[in-house]
Image: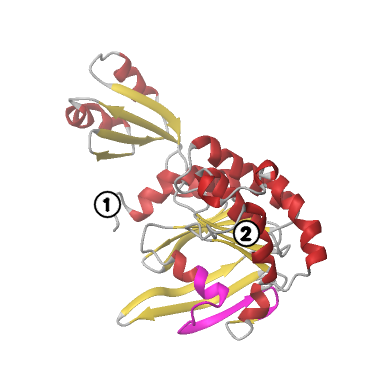
Amino acid sequence: MNPASPLIATGLRKSYGVNEVVCGVDLALQPGECFGLLGPNGAGKTTTLRLCLGLTAPDGGSIRVLGHDVPREGREARRRIGVVPQFDNLDPDFTVRENLRVFGRYFDIDNTTLQARIPALLEFAGLSSRADTRIQTLSGGMKRRLTLARALINDPELLFLDEPTTGLDPQARHVIWERLRNLLKQGKTLLLTTHFMEEAERLCSRIAIMDHGKIITGGEPRALIAQHVEPHVVEVYGEGVQEWADACGRRHAERCEITGETLFCYTRDPAPLIADLDRRGDLRYLHRRANIEDVFLKLTGRDLRD
């Protein structure tokens, strides 16, 4: 592991009663990268983040964040970290500008520095014209941009982003992605959890997939796709899809999965599947390249997690 890593976690463990929710997790981030930690609900992602932030004490393992041993030096480490929580916790009694100013005081940032820093953060969030607006009047996208700007008030070297675009419409999500790319260009290091596989594939240079408290695979997105799934996916919809799967799909595809009324055919050569489907009028299909979501579903399953 790189000793200059902003975050190194080794053999991380945490149990609640008889339930071990983090089971020997190893993480090592590289400076200036966006690292994605993916997993179904209950996989242990949020607990892992809390352990790395020093907010929860581990039962085993070691954590070093920005040169500080966590949780023993958790307070010192958190002074150099920005956090975007899963749910907005902005103060509704304050304006946009006041939320930034009050949060900056938690880091003992002097008023002169805050006065100089806040305008740039408002511009970064696209909220300069809303500086004196109260939080209740902001859209969901505006609130998430403000939460991101607030996480930058202490000019952090490392940011923890817990599902930063959940609940946003596509336009707002793309704006957040643009802001995160700008942070990477500035040399910030990002640790991202998300349920949007496209988000992880677009932003992350490396990804780890977590399930049942363990890291089950990790690496660069394209390398993970090549390692775990066939390169082509043909999605087939419509009545009679089960019969077509038995007659043609399973014969020409390396792997087939049915979810609801959709058949997913994973193959190295989609031509025979597409040729047969083009001769039929009762089935619709979509041919696409395999992606990280296909890897995620293959390794963690398609069953719902509560």
Query: Was residue 67 drawn as part of the magenta stretch in this picture?
Result: yes
Q: Residues within 10 Å of mark 2 (few under 14, many from 20)?
A: many
Q: Is residue 46 above or below residue 73?
A: above
Whether label 1 touches label 2, CB < 8 Å: no
* Residue 115: quadrant of the picture: bottom right
Amino acid type shown at disc 2: Asn
The region drawn magenta spans 49-68
Q: Which mark is residue 303?
A: 1
Q: Which mark is residue 99?
A: 2
| The N terminus, quarter of image | bottom right
Would residue 265 be visible to someone looking at this image?
yes
Distance Cα–Cα, label 1 vs label 2: 40 Å
Q: Residue at x 36, y 77 (%)?
A: 20
Q: Nearer the viewer, residue 204 or 216?
A: 204
Amino acid type shown at disc 1: Asp
For residue 131, side relative to residue 13 (left or right)? right
Query: Was residue 70 drawn as part of the magenta stretch in this picture?
Result: no
Q: Nearer the viewer, residue 243 or 8?
A: 8
* Residue 7: quadrant of the picture: bottom right
